Amino acid sequence: METIAAAVTGHRLYEDFEPFCKWITQEGQETLEIDLKGFKKEELKVQTNNKGFLTIYGEKPLDGASSKWNRFQKEIKLSKDIRANEISAMFSHGILSIIMPKMVKAAAKENIKEAGFEATQHAKDEAIEKHSILGVKTRKRRAIEVAFGVVAVMAVVVAIGTYYVTQFGNRYGDVSKVNVVNI
């Protein structure tokens, strides 16, 4: 348990902490296990709301002192495939286990979506093959066309430069003749 902050509320001094949590995913359900050693069942509260959130809250006196309390609160957004009205919780040996059953239809919908995705991907692959030249996809082909265009423009510039130098000579004189100065 990690201490996060302390706050004074009324006559109590609260020390907030973040308990250790572990998610267990199984076929048909998800389980959240929260390590709450030192807590009693009566000091814990688990609720869901109509906006799809699960709230877990707990507070207990710290070391029997009446003014110092330990507390935590977690709020978790439930996925759409969780059956919120069937969530259950049990507290045993300092571990709060929250069992969240999944909808059976959601698994079937997932399989249908995956099959639809594969069919869509196959259709896209066929369309790409139709729009390719020598196996190069259209986007790559466009990039290659641009690269060839740049190379062609550079070749023309070099050719014009070479022509100018050969016809009109180098303005710095003949580079092949070097004057050697003896000292």
Image (cartoon, rainbow, N blue to C red):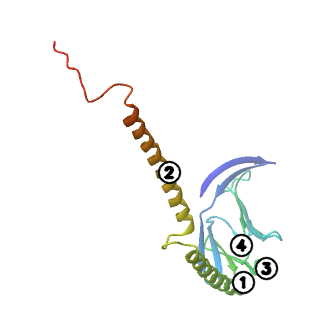
C-alpha separation, residue under disc 1 versus residue under disc 3: 11 Å
Task: Classify residue 8 as left or right of residue 121.
Answer: right
- Disc 4, SS: loop
User: In the image, what residue type sits under mark 1?
Assistant: Met
> Which mark is first along the chain, 4 or 1?
4
- Disc 2, SS: helix
- Residue positioned 53% across, 56% down in the render: 146
* Residue pointed to by mark 4: 79
* Residue pointed to by mark 3: 85
Rendered position, 87 above or below 142:
below
C-alpha separation, residue under disc 2 versus residue under disc 3: 64 Å
The C terminus: image quadrant: top left
Viewer-side label of 1, 2 = 2
Mark 1 in CB contact with mark 3 (< 8 angstroms): no
C-alpha separation, residue under disc 3 versus residue under disc 4: 13 Å
In front: 29, or 60? 29
C-alpha separation, residue under disc 2 versus residue under disc 4: 52 Å
> Which mark is first along the chain, 3 or 2?
3
* Residue pointed to by mark 1: 103
User: In the image, what residue type sits under mark 2?
Assistant: Val
Name the disc covering residue 150, or none: 2
